Image (cartoon, rainbow, N blue to C red):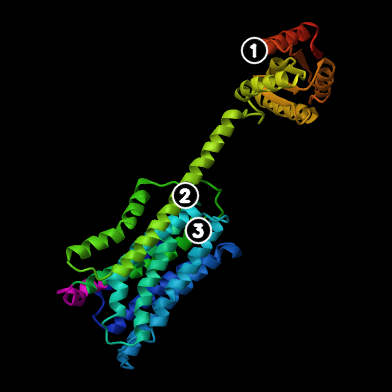
């Protein structure tokens, strides 16, 4: 790969020194383009078959684009074809759908589940820049030129193709997945194509000196070198060892906004009012319909983005609430839930005149188990035991982790005998040959929740004092 990069750099640098002849320049550009295609195909060959298709798309797009260079020279010098479209335009334009297909395949493989948040962010940026492209590029090539409708459509296809690549590149950058060297080489290549096209647009829109600047050889060749660099960067991306990771599916994760990305979204959202302000300052609004359409689209996209953000906040808040009410190790309700549910259950029992019992469970010799088998084994015992006990309870019963190796059980509509039977069933299924001690207290319809739990705790200590592995009421 290093030799490839060195050879490419030398060939591209030498482009400034070749003779000022159309066939020389087109031949040199074709050679650099073929070097890029060769790098892409060589790198793709090293990948598993299922990972090659995106790179083949890139190779096809670059190959078609560079083939159009000598075709354009041949059409102009040999055929005298100087009208639009030329025979080279279809070849030049194939770059956009081919690269777009490769990017779409990579995005799909990196994120099998649709990432609507990243898609909306990409749409906001593309809409803002698309409005600029319409006002300053696309509209100018579709109006006021002495060419046919087909020629205007071909000219407009170039900036539209750039917008397509920009949208997919932004979507790739906003998504999840590996971001190794190969990822950044692809991004740099696409960025170089966009920079080169933008440079020609800026020069072409200079009112007085655009034609003079375009005629300066070193300026023209410097812009050409941007495109040549883009061809080679695709090859570097394919040849790098990280190319095997670029198409690997990423774990689902929330999409975050960096300060730079937030600034880009803000700038894109302000493009439409900015254009309106410029035209009002000039004393004439000539792009009113386009600005209204752009403002409306951006407004709706921002509303969708806000709705996504609100839903994400609500989802995270629900997760926080659930985590605050669940024991992290066993997944059972925690002491916070118990403290909320017990007074409520006492109120129901008092209102209906039904019995209610509370039980405290403590695993026997749990410290010794931990010291003997280690804390990971102790954690597994807590999870297995809580799951086994939960399976013996009724649907109306509540099992919660009280703290450490202690658990508490709420047994609605249950008297002494039934409570004992339920706890003895749970004792029988305690895993790994372990046992527990349990204390049960039946509510007397007068004591508070704390007094009831304290009485169950006293019964638990009686069970321990009596030799453990038993249930005491």
Whole-number angstrom distance, CA of label 1 to CA of label 2: 44 Å
In the rendering, at what x and y percent does residue 296 appear?
Answer: 37, 61
Residue at the left extreme, as displayed: 208
26 displayed left or right of 344 = left
Give the residue number, with chain letter if any, for mark 2.
Answer: 307
In the rendered image, residue 131, in percent from the top left (x then y), is placed at 33, 66
By secondary structure, the bulk of the magenta-drawn segment is best described as: helix
Q: Quadrant of residue 214?
A: bottom left
Quadrant where the C terminus sits is top right
| Secondary structure state at the residue bearing disc 2 | helix
Q: Nearer the viewer, residue 175 or 15?
A: 175
Q: Is residue 111 left or right of residue 370?
A: left
Place of residue 298 in the rendered image (x, y in percent of width and height, measured from the top left): 38, 59
Query: From mark 2 to mark 3, how far is it between C-alphas?
Result: 36 Å
Q: Is residue 223 magenta?
A: no
Q: Where residue 320 sits in the image (x, y, percent)?
A: 54, 34
User: Quarter of the image containing the N terminus?
Assistant: bottom left
Residue 216 belongs to magenta span: yes
Viewer-nearest residue: 15 or 71: 71
The answer to whether residue 50 is visible is yes
**Tag of residue 243:** 3
In this picture, residue 452 sits left or right of residue 175:
right
Label 3 – label 1 distance at C-alpha? 63 Å
Residue to which mark 1 is pinned: 450
Closer to the N terminus: mark 2 or mark 3? 3
Q: Is residue 57 above or below residue 421?
A: below
Tell me the tag on residue 360: none
Write the start and end of the magenta stretch as one range. Answer: 207-222
């Amino acid at each position: 790969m290093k030799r490839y990069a060195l050879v490419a750099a030398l060939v591209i640098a030498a482009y400034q020194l070749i003779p000022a002849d159309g066939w020389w320049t087109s031949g040199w550009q074709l050679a650099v383009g073929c070097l890029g295609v060769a790098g892409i195909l060589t790198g793709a060959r090293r990948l598993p078959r299922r990972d090659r298709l995106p790179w083949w798309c890139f190779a096809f797009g670059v190959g078609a684009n560079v083939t159009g260079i000598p075709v354009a020279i041949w059409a102009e010098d040999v055929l005298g074809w100087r009208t639009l479209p030329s025979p080279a335009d279809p070849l030049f334009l194939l770059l956009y759908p081919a690269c777009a297909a490769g990017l779409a395949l990579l995005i799909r493989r990196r994120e099998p589940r649709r990432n609507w948040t990243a898609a909306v962010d990409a749409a906001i940026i593309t809409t803002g820049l698309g409005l600029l492209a319409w006002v300053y590029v696309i509209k100018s090539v579709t109006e006021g030129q002495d060419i046919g409708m087909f020629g205007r459509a071909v000219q407009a296809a170039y900036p539209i193709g750039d917008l397509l690549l920009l949208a997919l590149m932004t979507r790739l950058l906003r998504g999840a997945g590996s971001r190794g060297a190969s990822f950044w080489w692809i991004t740099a290549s696409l960025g170089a194509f966009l920079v080169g096209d933008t440079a020609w647009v800026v020069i072409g829109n200079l009112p007085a000196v655009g034609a003079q600047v375009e005629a300066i050889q070193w300026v023209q060749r410097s812009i050409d070198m941007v495109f040549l660099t883009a061809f080679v960067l695709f090859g570097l991306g394919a040849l790098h060892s990280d190319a095997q990771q670029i198409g690997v599916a990423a774990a689902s994760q929330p999409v975050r906004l960096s300060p730079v990305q937030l600034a880009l979204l803000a700038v894109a959202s302000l493009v439409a009012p900015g254009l309106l302000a410029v035209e009002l300052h000039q004393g004439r609004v000539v792009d009113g319909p386009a600005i209204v359409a752009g403002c409306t689209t951006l407004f709706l996209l921002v509303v969708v983005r806000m709705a996504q953000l609100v839903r994400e906040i609500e989802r995270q808040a629900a997760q926080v609430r659930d985590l605050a009410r669940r024991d992290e190790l066993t997944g059972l309700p925690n002491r916070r839930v118990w403290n909320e549910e017990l007074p409520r259950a006492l109120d129901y029992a008092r209102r209906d005149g039904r019995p209610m019992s509370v039980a405290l469970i403590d695993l026997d010799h749990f410290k010794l188990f931990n010291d003997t088998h280690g804390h990971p084994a102790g954690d597994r015992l807590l999870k297995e035991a809580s799951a086994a006990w939960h399976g013996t309870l009724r649907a109306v019963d509540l099992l919660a982790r009280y703290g450490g190796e202690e658990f508490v059980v709420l047994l609605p509509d249950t008297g002494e005998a039934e409570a004992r039977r339920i706890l003895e069933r749970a004792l029988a299924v305690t895993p790994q040959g372990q046992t527990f001690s349990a204390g049960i207290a039946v509510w007397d319809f007068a004591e508070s929740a704390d007094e009831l739990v304290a009485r169950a705790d006293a019964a638990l200590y009686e069970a321990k004092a009596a030799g453990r592995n038993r249930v005491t009421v």
